[in-house]
Amino acid sequence: MRKFFQRLGSSLMLPVAVLPAAAVLLGIGYWIDHDGWGTGNAVAAFLIMAGKSIIDNIAMLFALGVALGMSKDRDGSAALSGLVAYLVVTTLLGSDSVAMLQGIDPENVDPSFIKIGNAFVGIICGLVAASMYNRFSHVRLPDALAFFSGKRLVPIMTSLAMLVLSLVLLLVWPPVYSLLVQFGEWISGLGAIGAGLYGFFNRLLIPTGLHHALNAVFWFDVAGINDISNFWTGNGEKGVTGMYQAGFFPIMMFGLPAAGLAMYHTAKTKHRKQVGSLMLAAGFAAILTGVTEPIEFAFMFLAPMLYLVHAVLTGLSLAIAAAFQWTAGFGFSAGLIDFILSYNLTLANQPYMLLVQGLVFAVIYYFLFRFIIVKFDLKTPGRGEELEETATVSRDRSSIDSKYTAQAEKIYAALGGSENVTSIDNCATRLRLEVKSVDVVDQQKIKATGVPGVHVTGAESIQVIVGPNVQFVADEMKKLHRNDGRSVSGS
């Protein structure tokens, strides 16, 4: 079950990674015409509508992304089937279709069917499509029907499965939607406290990857909150819409980089240069893009007490920003790029105060982390012996070999190579690996490549935290795995 949710979380990152494009288009469009939202400038209107085309179809992107990510070999036909699934269910359960099926006036249709095209249903469509792909992509039909064998069979079986599921949802969706809305209204009713609780659990769930499911409830149109889309399209209440995003800016841009500085200053002198290089790169990524996992994973498992403090401070930050109604928004994460793009949006409310709050949190993070590390002698990076053998990555390689290739080769070898590695995947910052046995893995050699951390998630699964460039390392490792497989089969 854990593997399922971790892989689902990774799959959800595919559509979420598209949101920065929408943020850039909407942000620039609104900077050009911040009074008329495009009504006074054709270029602004063009950019804003282009951005809205992504934001307004996020549910469809979830169906595509989850179908692709959850399929066993990430084939394009799985994504196509995800689109088929989404089109079938949203057409069959649209207001007019439901009115016809129930023999009632469209105005009397349950309101839940007006919202059938939401992220929650998109995820369900993706899961169904991936399941159909994994089950039928290699099925061979009789010669007379051979054209429809294999991958061509998947969209057909997906559409049939969605016919059945649509009938189920016709009965089940109204009460499910009602519960989701009640949950959203309950959290929203808690105001700043609700925002704080969300921020706390958002960070607390990071190690499991389940924070993506929680984010979907608050950021997208699952429970009626839809914080990201409403903020960027101006469809909300100033000072309220964006409350589930704003409090992250002081943490991502100020708090965690300050925590990294504290870990650098408390590291042993002989390790300080290595820790400094790691924290400098990770801190820059956090400030600029809001990607914080390289910093968080550096102390998450080495010092769980610190991570709990970090989760509490994150919740406190969101609660404070919500209480004072300071709002800004992001398309991907709470970094400087998104802060600048959202600064002048209609629903941005005193966003500069988030910078003031960030400076305060930087001081709190630095001194609190430094005190706890020293007081309890926590083995944060550079305070144990885990960096004793750390070496740079393949300095003796020829200039035509990239650093990603060199790093991938070392990590792959430390994992046990083709004899131990069974699956290679990645999310935004981590390698997600399946192995025959984690006992074979040499974690010290992996850490010696300069990665922020290694996390064993099961007897046959392990994660390596690389950072924002993880895709390039993963691609090189997949090449090694394919080549090793051919070598073994040909020997």
Image (cartoon, grey):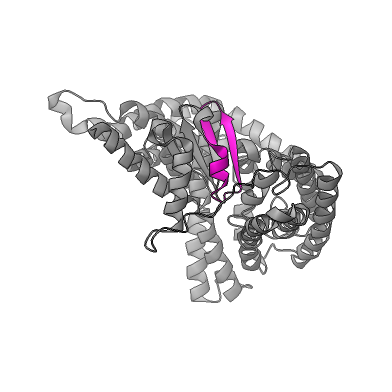
- In front here: 166 or 387? 387
Image side of residue 489 versus residue 230, left or right: left
Image side of residue 121 versus residue 145, left or right: right
Percent across and percent down for residue 455 are 60, 37
Q: Residue 137 lies in what quarter of the image?
A: top left
Q: How many labels does the image show?
A: 0
For image coordinates 57% across by 49% down, the residue present is: 451
Q: Residue 29 lies in what quarter of the image?
A: bottom right
Image side of residue 456 versus residue 295, left or right: left
Image side of residue 256 versus residue 223, left or right: right
For image coordinates 55% across by 32% down, the residue present is: 5
Image quadrant holding the C terminus, namely: top left
Percent across and percent down for residue 64 are 42, 43
Image quadrant holding the N terminus, namely: top right
Q: Can residue 246 be seen in this view?
A: no
Region of the chain picked out in magenta, as a range = 442-462
On screen, residue 470 above or below 142: below
- Residue 455 in the magenta stretch? The answer is yes
